[in-house]
Image: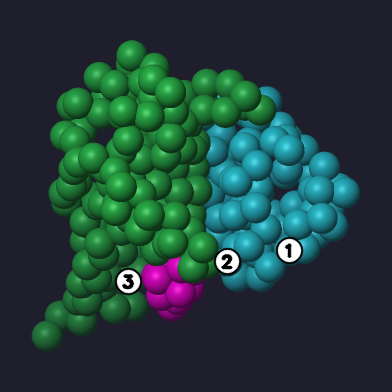
Chain colours: A cyan, B green
Amino acid sequence: MPAPLRDIVRALEAFGGVVDRPSSGSHWRARMGGKVYPLAAHNGERSEIRDLYIKGLCRCFDLDESEFRKKL
Amino acid sequence: MDGTCRHDYNLWIVVHPPEKDVPGQWLAHCLEFDTISQGNSFEHALKMIFEAIVMVVHADRLAGREPMERRAPEEFYEELYALLGRGEKVSMAELEKLSHEGRITTPCATQIELHARHVENRAQEAVPRLMRQFPVFTQPELACC
């Protein structure tokens, strides 16, 4: 299931992640455990993030996908 | 020696056309860095993944990490090899035309060459540059099915 970017940010923060919103570029920068993952924000915080994208995010940060989805 | 290191990467990008769950959003996946982005069109998705790749390489180099260690799981490469085996090689211009005609309904793959220059102890200079983009592999004949 896809999810709005604002929900993904909230879920990441619940897992201790931080999301920076650079003033330039079309991506926000999610940080957790010393790793960085870009979040496509070209349509603002209402951007709908596709399922495959969410799976990739969870892989990067070693998050259990089902636990992450519970926070969305 | 000026302490400059250069890192060259050949990266596979798999682009997925929009699906019903998120209409209009093309997704681009860089397999070597297991990095994903999305955009409002085929071209926009490519532009977005280039920007995402630059962010990843820059961040990993700053952290003393090798971005290739992010490599996507093998199942994604198996899908890529299957696509390369059965796909048709087309130019980027042809691909853009097909996508504008709504004739891309299956994933496409392309390869890019990226050069990143890193100066020891001056990590802020580790800015990667996209050097070259190779042809795209796609299956336009399936779009009519």
**How many other residues sit within 10 Å of disc 3, few (<14), some (14-19) or many (≥20)?**
few
At 26% from the left and 65% from the top, the residue drawn is B9
How many marks do you count on the picture? Answer: 3
Q: Residue furthest bottom?
A: B1
* Chief secondary structure of the magenta portion: helix
> Vertical placement of B128 versus B38: above or below?
below
What residue is shown with label 1?
A63
Task: Give the mark toward the camera: 2 or 1.
Answer: 1
> Vertical placement of A38 versus B145: above or below?
below
Residue B53 makes an appearance in the image: no
Badge 3 marks a residue whose secondary structure is loop
**How many other residues sit within 10 Å of disc 2, few (<14), some (14-19) or many (≥20)?**
some
Residue B122 is marked as: 3
Badge 2 marks a residue whose secondary structure is strand
Quadrant into which the N terminus of chain B falls = bottom left
**Residue B47 position in % (x across, y down):** 35, 36
**How many other residues sit within 10 Å of disc 1, few (<14), some (14-19) or many (≥20)?**
some
Q: Magenta residues, as a range?
A: B59-71
The image quadrant of residue B79 is bottom left
Q: Amino acid at mark 3?
A: Arg
What residue is shown with label 2?
A35
First in sequence: mark 2 or mark 1?
Answer: 2
Whether the residues at callouts 1 and 3 have beta carbons within 8 Å, the answer is no
